[in-house]
Amino acid sequence: MIKIAVLGYGTVGSGVVKVLNTNAKLIAKRAGQEVEVKYILDLRDFPGDPAQSKVVHDYNIIAEDPEISIVVETMGGTKPAYEFVKKALQSGKSVCTSNKELVAAYGAELVHIAKSKNANFLFEASVGGGIPIIRPLNQSLTADRIEQINGILNGTTNYILTKMEKDGSDFAGVLKEAQQLGYAEKDPTADVEGYDACRKIAILTSLAYGQQVDYEDIYTEGITKITAEDFQYAKALHASIKILGSSKRIGGKLYAMVAPQMIREDNPLYSVKGVFNAICVTGNMLGDVMFYGRGAGKEATASAVVSDVVDAVKHMNVNVMTIWEDEKLEVAPMDEMKNRFFVRIGIGEKAKAKEVFTEGEEVDGGVEGEFGFLTGEMTEKAFREAIAGFDSFITRIRVGF
Ligand code: HSE
């Protein structure tokens, strides 16, 4: 019998207890022994909840109990999660977490501590919720050089963009609706500004290359400026608009960004709708492989956390190797990245646009008083400098085709 503690009894933490109860027998069979939740750490009490008898308010009870061999961290944020997780690992306990802020900021250090203690720091649920992506990157895609990762890494924003596309509605109205349905937080900033996806692409890229990629270095643009008119143009291009977390290695340089992009049907991410997430990884031998599923939600995310618990039980006192060196992998300056752009300007500057963007292709989105066009491939810097000369510039969206 393995005894574990769950830190944080919110959506994911209570989901972990539910998954462990619902599938207790088969989890015991797969882990090789029964898994019992001995403690739940939370500031609150949960009168009437069967788990109430396990609730403690002092982390030291867990940290100092030698019977606890696995700590599940589902608190979110880095304070006090980092301190708690570090302490658990230093005393030889394994940690399974769903916390992307913690993993993006301290992953390399925590992986290293786990290794030094023959324990494990596992974080399958930190990216893509229930989608298996961390274990595949670590243990399955080991024969390939990873060339590119492209992912729809946030359910809230994919829901909003899907709904805007379907109903022809504007961002603000759909956000409100998403909040009422519980698909967006009361404070939606981390999702709609792309910060959540940024941490996730930083984690995936760090694992793909085995080195620390700082999320602060990744150019991040959210979806708050996307409009119903943008979708009209996208439709004319037989494209959709998705916010993607992307990283690729070209000629020894790493490029990474989170930004809305127009993609077409031939892109496997095109048909990922609503709250679903998907991650497309390109290996130099394998080609494209895509992972698809529920990127958020109580049971789906908890399922991924419990899969880590099973892994930790199966590898008690044996470190499952994760290569994540703390030596920083530099992200190339955004100015150097090459992209194509879809651009909207006032109709009065159409002739000038044709002169400046010689490779431009006109796009008829049926919006009066405007000129829409696609540029050829150019660096971000060249685009920025060229577009600065247009007084009637409205918007631009990067193009992934
Ligand atoms: N807010 C996140 C999302 C939750 O919408 O994907 C999962 O990280």
Image (tube, rainbow, N blue to C red):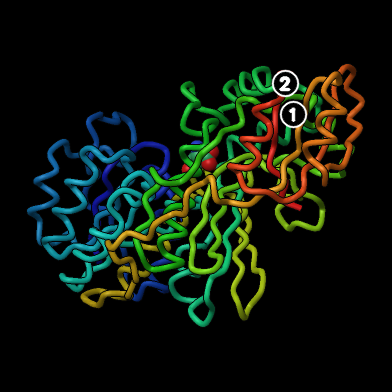
In this rendering, position of residue 222 left or right of residue 298? right
- The residue lying at 50 percent from left, 76 percent from top is 140
Q: Is residue 70 above or below residue 140?
A: above
Q: In terms of depth relative to the viewer, which is nearer, 326 or 16?
A: 326
Q: Earlier in the sequence, mark 2 or mark 1?
A: 1
In the picture, the disc for residue 362 is none
Q: CA distance from mark 2 to mark 1?
A: 6 Å
Which residue is depicted at the point 26% across and 37% down?
Answer: 52
Q: Residue at x 46, y 66 (%)?
A: 208
Which residue is nearer to you in this view: 55 or 259? 259
Q: Which residue is mark 1?
A: 164
Specify the amino acid type for callout 1. Answer: Met
Task: Using the image, tell me which numbered label, if any, was put on residue 170.
Answer: 2
Q: Contact, CB < 8 Å: mark 2 with mark 1?
A: yes
**In the image, residue 323 above or below residue 370:** below
Which quadrant would residue 94 be assigned to in this image?
bottom left
Quarter of the image with the N terminus in it: bottom left
Picture quadrant where residue 56 is located: top left
Left or right side of 59 for 209? right
Mark 2 secondary-structure assignment: loop
Type of amino acid at the residue the image marks with label 2 = Asp
Residue at 57%, 60% in the rendered image = 149
Residue 19 in view, yes or no: no
